[in-house]
Image (tube, rainbow, N blue to C red):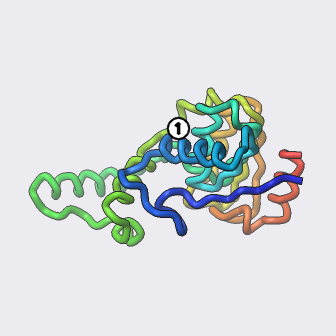
Amino acid sequence: MHRVTVLDFAGFGESEEPAEPYGVPDYASDVISLLGIIGIKDAHFVGHSFGGRVCLELAAKFPHIVRSVALVDSAGLKPRRGLKYYVKVGTHKLLRRLGLKGLKGSSDYRTLSQVMRETFKKVVNYDQTPLLDSVRCPAAVFWGKDDGETPPYMARKLNDGIRGSYLFWLDGGHFSYVDDSAKFIAILRAFIG
């Protein structure tokens, strides 16, 4: 039997936005503070997508509190970018230098406050690849075979970079823990147990 604590990060869900733009280390510090407040000295951490970024940060920089980590369709690695991406970014920067508005971001990005836009930029530009070798706790990498948000090559890169980690493929996409929930729960229970 395990106690489960689920949190909304600052600026997510029902939580207030941070006063200033946050980066992944700031979110990890918030988790450390929460653990102190609720009296947890060490724990197993499970993180999906952005939550996986925070789990990686905790496992690499605060190993004394991380008993194990489960990364589920995790973000945190620099994505492979094609020519189309670089043309779009270059066009945006050129327009900005010319004093024009530049290209619009995604509809999600456009609805964010200024603080959360800056937070978003800090988070997505933070490549955690150099941290992988510092993760020494037991680690499980769960990945949807059809994940289009964090493609499967990222799963292999995490698995190769975290010594002794286990890679589990799930049926589904970016929300593989929902798409293939029975398999995910069974493996996670065995891994933590």
Please report the residue visible at 85 percent of the width from the left and 65 percent of the height from the top: 182
Q: How many marks?
A: 1
Q: Nearer the viewer, residue 73 or 61?
A: 61
- From the top left corner, tell me how far across and down residue 175 is, in percent: 66, 64
- From the top left corner, tell me how far across and down residue 18 is, in percent: 42, 55
Q: Nearer the viewer, residue 51 or 148?
A: 51
Please report the residue visible at 68 percent of the width from the left and 48 percent of the height from the top: 71
Q: Nearer the viewer, residue 128 or 9?
A: 9
- From the top left corner, tell me how far across and down residue 187 is, in percent: 85, 52
- From the top left corner, tell me how far across and down residue 107 is, in percent: 38, 72
Above or below, comparing residue 166 to residue 179 in the picture: above
Q: Which residue, given by chain and number where applicable, does mark 1 sit on?
A: 128
Please report the residue visible at 62 percent of the width from the left and 60 percent of the height from the top: 147
**Residue 58 in view of the camera:** yes
Type of amino acid at the residue the image marks with label 1:
Gln
Relative to residue 49, is residue 103 drawn left or right? left
Pick the quarter of the image with the N terminus.
bottom right
Q: Secondary structure at mark 1?
A: loop
Quadrant for residue 60, please give it. top right
